[in-house]
Image (tube, coloured by chain):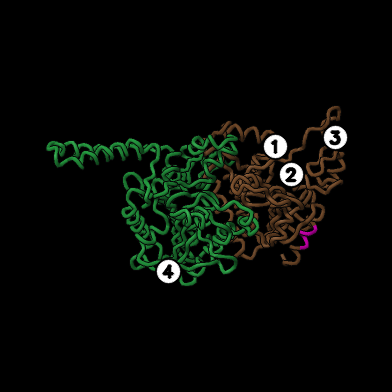
Chain colours: A green, B brown
Amino acid sequence: MAGIIHRLAFERPIFELEARLEKLESSADSVVDAHDEIRRLRVELSRLKRKIYSELKPWETVQVARHPDRPMTTDYLELAFEEFVELHGDKAFSDDRAIRTGFAKLDQYKVMVIGHQKGKTLKERNACYFGCAHPEGYRKALSKMKLAAKYRIPVICLIDTPGAYPGIGAEERGQAQMIANNLFEMSRLPTPIICVVIGEGGSGGALGIGVGDRVAILEHAYYSVISPEGCAGILWKSGAYAEKAAEALKLTSKDLYRLGVVDDVIEEPLGGAHRDPHLMASRLKMYLLQQLRQLVDRPTDALLEARYQKFRAMGVFLEGGVPDGQPGETTTNDAAVTPSSDARR
Amino acid sequence: MVSHKSHAPTKPKRGVPEGLWKRCPGCQATIFRKEAEKRLGVCPECDYHWYVSARQRVEQLLDEGTFEEWDAQLEPTDPLGFADRKPYHERLKSEQSRTGLREAAVTGTGMIRARRVAFGVTDSAFIMGSMGSVVGEKLTRLIERATEQNLPLIIISGSGGGARMHEGILSLMQMAKVSAALARYDKAGGLFISVLTNPTMGGVAASFASLGDVVFAEPKALIGFAGPRTIKATIRIELPKGFQTSEFLLEHGFIDRIVRRSDLKSEIARTIDYCGK
């Protein structure tokens, strides 16, 4: 996608093998028996990718989620949706470029897409504060969601932010208030909402467009109460402990599914979404279509009741020291998770 | 999520009996403790509103003997097996013995000038008053009961910690859970008075604390989304004086009234009366 190839440290064996393979392939004409070797290397390469990516440590997952070539909202709009009619502005302050909003078509469905955008070029990244939205971004998102709800157009939220922007202007214009408003209104928005964490699910900035009937996550994305660096800075008193914090926070798709916070994990192409954005987009599209089919005809009352109960069940605690069988209230850590996603549907 | 220096009483001077005098965090003056307590924990010199515990809040705001606690049996656990420099389960134990609280929130019902209310308070001494599963659950149950019993709802926030890191994503989800309960309470016509005290930050500010039908703040409280240190580290310029205080929020239009602690009870009662609750 970009001119430069970004390499993550743990991907080094993959790149080395790819280089060897490439060299061999380019000289294959002159070397007769290279074909077997090429075939062997190809098998080895996909085995290696599978191995490395199936054993990613939480901190490595964070790096994949932040990969500069990782597909963003605008990529999915291009690859998975037929059309995107951007609707700008919050009608109060400005048009936050860190959140894109507009009508889109997904096969036969008309939808409203709300998505964080980090930006591709340096210029675009600066314009959208690297995906960190200001209060006007959250206000814009809510006004477009309300527009969608008026005509019962389903809302699709694509989450990809390091967090809401921490700055003077953001505080002056009510960052906390705008995120709170979104949680409040999204919980009762009378139209289906499907949220997918496509990269970084950074804290309140992610949750601000993250309340829905379905919450899914891409396999190597993460979703966390705070960035590993921020957590390390506060609890370990040094950002250098980010790797430890990433482990402690249980922020990977596997952990989130186990904790009952996400309903579904969408599998990524071998070696991560950035290695095959087309395949990733088609899987995302398939998932969205599948969920839309389930949700569009559901009566609004039933939809909102299920949405309420879904979030109502989240949390783990003890009640009088004994498990009382209520959802989400158990004693042991292993069993201490909210009901499975199937039960919540 | 937001780090913030605690306003626990500073050590008294050498030679002074423990607890007789207190140094005011606002003006650094040494204040006779009894005098400050008589003024509900407000410095007689500079009007700085000191930290008061959840129990003291109950005493200060509810009519004597009317408080009936709800869900006191709820206790935190360690769903992630979280450990930073200290395991979370140990931290919980030491916070519990230090504060005498099971968790950072106390909820229940009582009377304010003979008006029955649903009442909740978060105590910033317990892991910065941060919201984990128990705080989220207690507040949600409080709101649901206020909805069922048609009671006005008062929540006093003192949470420098926002969403509690030690319970990870589950803490973040409490923001959605409590806000959803408030949306139902709103639909049922409830009156929610949110009182912001020092400090109210992060995920608490970005959920229930900001969702009051009427929002009060005590003077000079630190209120905001991102912590001042985080902002400073991001933008690398000095923050303006008075940034993220109650007065700053009032000026920018995010709170209805700044209310001194001594007036809080009567202001709450008056608002309930205006709304016919």
Nearer the camera: disc 3 or disc 4: 4
In primary-sequence order, the first of circles 2 and 3 is: 3
Q: Mark 4, chain letter?
A: A
Distance, label 3 to label 4, CA atoms, is 68 Å
In this view of the protein, which residue sits in the foreground, A161 or A286? A161
Compared across the picture, whether A300 is left or right of A28 comes to: right
- Most distant residue in the bottom direction: A151
Note whether B200 is above or below B212 in the view shown. Answer: above
Q: Amino acid at mark 4?
A: Val
Q: Amino acid at mark 1?
A: Gly
Q: In this figure, which residue is indicated by the disc labeled 3?
A: B20
Q: Main secondary structure of the magenta part?
A: helix
- On residue B100, the disc is 1
Q: In this figure, which residue is indicated by the disc labeled 2?
A: B55
Task: Work out whether residue A207 can be spotted.
Answer: no
Range shown magenta: B266-270
Q: Secondary structure at mark 4?
A: strand
Q: In this figure, which residue is indicated by the disc labeled 4?
A: A85
On the image, the x and y values in percent for residue A294 come to 38, 61
Distance, label 1 to label 3, CA atoms, is 21 Å
**Residue A66 shown in magenta:** no
In primary-sequence order, the first of circles 1 and 3 is: 3
Q: Mark 2, chain letter?
A: B
